[in-house]
Image: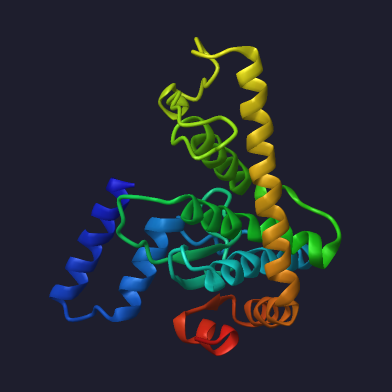
Amino acid sequence: EIANVCNEAALLAARAEKDEIEFEDFEQAIDRVIAGLEKKNKIISPEERNIVAYHEAGHAIVGWFLEHTDPVIKVSIVPRGLAALGYAQSLPDERYLYTTEAFMDRMAMTMGGRVAEEIVFGKISTGAQNDLERITKLAYAMVADYGMSERIGYVSFNLSASNDRPFAGRPYSEETARAIDSEVRSIIDEVRVRTRQILDQRRSLLEDMAQALLQREVLGPKDLKDILGP
């Protein structure tokens, strides 16, 4: 990632010396760094493109209306990188401390794509695999690292620092392990229900945004505000 940033900076600097650089160049450079190179030769079927549009719209809508998520500034269904068929770009908010509410909001936004697929198509795709991985890791961190579960208590087993092997030499019993697993599932179920309520209440916005993405492929800040409101 650092190498990508350096390469993009060098290209922009070279063009700037020739007075050829424009704001659009910066936007394209950011997209390449965040999501990879645009894959113009990647052929996507209309059915898959439709799923990606609703998936990304789901992320954006949930993030737009929750208090503790980073501001959504762009949504795209242009294929990039090795696997990304689309993405919702947020403007990171500089913060050092996170509350339970902030984690729950962020998980809901991440869950938005999968839930949007359920609502619209009545079935789910493999496109949410990375989203679910992030949600699961965060839920385990809340319960076993940050002491954010009343059921487990004010304890920290520091699972996130164990090289993706959370149960190697674990300092707790099988009973506690089952309680952690149960609590994580409860948190994720709560997030799913909440995300579903948000999108059900804004079903027309989900349609509007998905159709706009299918027509234009990329929606910027002004487009998002026009569709979703302030």
Q: Is residue 175 left or right of residue 30?
A: right
From the viewer's side, name the closer residue of 73 and 149. 149
Rendering coords of residue 124 (x, y %): 79, 53
Rendering coords of residue 158 (x, y %): 42, 26
Q: Is residue 92 left or right of residue 210?
A: left
From the viewer's side, name the closer residue of 12 and 64. 64
49 to 183, vertically: above or below: below
Query: What is the quadrant of residue 207 in the picture?
Result: bottom right
Give the residue furthest to the top. 169
From the viewer's side, name the closer residue of 172 and 207. 172
Q: Is residue 197 left or right of residue 163?
A: right
For the point 23% across and 80% down, which residue is it? 20
Give the residue furthest to the right. 122
Rendering coords of residue 70 (x, y %): 43, 64
Q: Is residue 14 left or right of residue 155?
A: left
142 to 153, vertically: above or below: below
Can see residue 127? no
- Total count of labels: 0
Query: What is the quadrant of residue 15 in the picture?
Result: bottom left
Give the residue furthest to the bottom. 226
For the point 30% across and 59% down, which residue is it? 94
Rendering coords of residue 208 (x, y %): 69, 83
For the point 52% across and 56% down, which residue is it? 106
Q: How is the image coloured?
A: rainbow
From the viewer's side, name the closer residue of 214 and 166. 166
Can see residue 25? yes
